[in-house]
Amino acid sequence: MKTVWLALAALPLVCGCLVMGGGNRLRYVATPRLEVSFSSIAAADEFYRGIAAADRGDYTEGGGFFVIPLLVMGGATFHETEFYNAQVRRTDVDRDTVISDAEAAAYRAAMEAEKK
């Protein structure tokens, strides 16, 4: 009987951990997105390719990961609206709320250069 209880007590140690939480979560806040238009479809494509290459580190909080027997917790919260607004401000250099082909191309090149 003692062997059975000992085996049951050791079971959580050999079975691994139960995963709870984790991953990335988006956080939308009351801050509205900046209104912007594009001079062409090519400018929009360049801008969104630049966003895909941009570093999100300053707009992500958390991301820690810790393990407790039978429980794994972790994850991060990404502040999507603040990130988008910052990228629009960085791209629209002349502040006319229209992103031109040249502005979008320069932004994408800068984001890809920072990524390397």
Image (cartoon, rainbow, N blue to C red):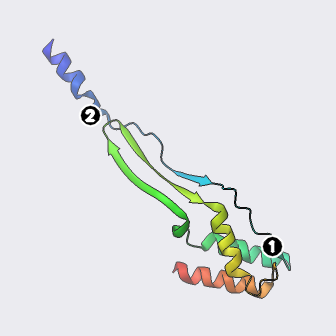
Q: How many marks?
A: 2
Q: Residue at x 22, y 28 (%)?
A: 10
How far from the left and from the top, in percent, is residue 37? 83, 74
Quadrant occupied by the N terminus: top left
CA distance separating discs 1 and 2:
55 Å
Percent position (x, y) of residue 9? 22, 25
Measured along the vertical axis of the image, is residue 25 above or below residue 52? above
Residue visible at 71% across and 71% down in the picture: 48
> Which image quadrant is residue 18 in?
top left
What crowding class fits label 1: few (fewer than 14 Cα within 10 Å), some (14-19), or many (20 or more)?
Answer: some
Looking at the picture, how far across and down is residue 106, in whole percent? Answer: 69, 87
Residue at label 2?
Answer: 14
Q: Nearer the viewer, mark 1 or mark 2?
A: 1
Q: Decide: marks 1, 2 in contact (CB < 8 A)? A: no
Q: Where residue 67 sits in the image (x, y, percent)?
A: 33, 45
Residue at 67%, 74% (x, y): give it: 87
Q: Amino acid at mark 1?
A: Val
Amino acid at pointer 2: Val
Q: Earlier in the sequence, mark 1 or mark 2?
A: 2
SS at circle 1: loop
Q: Is residue 40 left or right of residue 69?
A: right
Say if 23 sits above or below 57 in the image: above
Label 2 secondary element: helix
Q: Is 52 left, or right, of 1 in this rendering? A: right
Q: Which label belongs to residue 96?
A: none
Q: Residue at x 55, y 65 (%)?
A: 59
Q: Which residue is mark 1?
A: 36
Of residue 14 and residue 69, the one placed in the foreground of this image is 69
Which residue extends farthest front? 30
**Circle 2 Cα neighbour tier, 10 Å, few/some/many (<14 / 14–19 / ≥20):** few
